[in-house]
Image (tube, grey):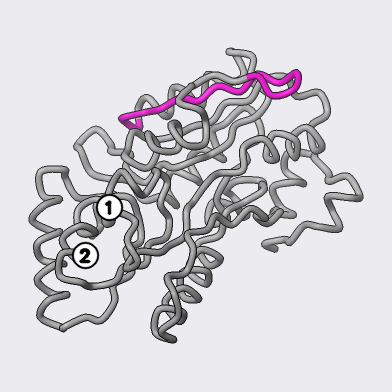
Amino acid sequence: MDTKRLPKELFHQRAQLAYDFVIEQNAELVVLADDNALRLLGSRLLKQQIPIVFLGINANPRRYVPLTNNVSGVLERPLMKRSIAMIKAVIPQVRKVKILMSDSVSSREIVKTSLGNRLSHSIGNIQVDTVISSTFSHWQQSTKGSQEQGYDAIILATYATLKNEVNNTLTVDYVTKWTSKNSPVPVFSFWSFSVGQGKAIGGLTISGQEQGVEAAKKVNLFYAGKQRPPITTPHRGSFIFSHAELRRWQLSLPPRLFKKAKFIE
C-alpha cells in the first residue's frame, strides 16, 4: 500500500490495485499490515468471503471492519507508562518528557487508543506531552527547542509521513539520525527500528518481528480449520538499547534493567 509515502489522493487508486491483485491471485487469506490497509481493503475482502489477518493496527479494528469469524489480528499499542518508568530508571532526575509524532492516521489512532485522546499526561511526577508535526521543519523546531522548554528526554513514536520543504516524504532512518544528532536531550523510542548507533538510545520497544510472528500464528490457525483466532495485543515489549548511544549521553542502565536488556551493538 505504501500509504506512509503516497499522497492521500492516491490511496484509493493504490487500494484498487491491491484488491485487483488479490482477486486475480484467487487469494485464500490476506494479511493487512497497518490501519490504512485495513481501512481501505478490509470490508471489500470480507464481502468476497476472504479471511483477513491484520497487524500493526493502532485503532480499534471495529472502526474499519465488522469482527466476523473471518477476521483476526494483532493490535499495536505503545507501552507508554512502562516506557516512562524505564526512562525514570535511566534518568532519575527526569521531570518532563516529550513524545514526537508525525501527523498520520497511525499517530491520531495512537493518541485515541493509547493516550486517552489527550496530548498531555502526568505519570507519577513526570509531565508527558505529545507533539504532532505535519512537516519536518516543525519537527526540527520541536526537537531543538526541547531543552529550552524544560524537557529532559524525547520519545520517538510514529514519524513515517514527515515531508521536507519540497513535499518529499523523508525516510524514517533519516529522521531518526537527524533527531539523534540534533536533540539537546536524550532520545528514546517506542519502536526497535529506531534504536542504534547514531539513532535512539533505546526503549521498551514494540517489534515488527513480534507483530509478524503473532500474525503468522493466527494465519496458521485459520488454515488448521480451527475457530477464529482471538485478536491480541502483545504486552511484553523488549528493552533494547545501544551501547554507543548510552556512552554518548553518559548514561548507564541500573542492574535490574541491564539484565533484561538486549543491545544493538
Q: Is residue 30 above or below residue 54?
A: below
Q: For residue 65, which numbered disc appears in the image?
A: 1
Determine whether, in the image, residue 209 is placed left or right of residue 140. right
Query: Does residue 173 sit above or below 46 in this rendering?
Result: above
Residue closer to the observer: 175 or 208: 208
- Is 131 magenta? The answer is yes
Mark 1: secondary structure: loop
Q: Callout 2: few (<14), some (14-19), or many (20+) C-alpha neighbours within 10 Å? A: some
Quarter occupied by the C terminus: bottom right
Q: Amino acid at mark 1?
A: Val
Q: Is residue 10 magenta?
A: no
Q: State whether the magenta stretch is mostly helix, strand or loop.
A: strand
Residue 90: give x, y in percent of width and height. 80, 38
Mark number, residue 110:
none
Q: Earlier in the sequence, mark 2 or mark 1?
A: 2
Q: Quadrant of residue 31?
A: bottom left
Which amino acid, by three-letter code, is at mark 2?
Leu
In x, y percent, where is residue 68? 32, 61
Q: Residue at coordinates 59% horizontally, 13% vertically from top-left?
A: 148
Residue range highlighted in magenta: 122-136
Q: Which mark is residue 46?
A: 2
Residue closest to the eye, 208 or 7:
208
Which residue is nearer to you in this view: 212 or 252? 212
Q: Secondary structure at mark 2?
A: helix
What is the CA distance from the residue labelled 2 to the residue labelled 1? 8 Å
The residue most toward the bottom is 224
Q: Pointers 2 and 1 in contact (CB under 8 A)?
A: yes
Residue at image location 44% in from the left, 74% down from the top: 227
Q: How many numbered marks does the figure carry?
A: 2
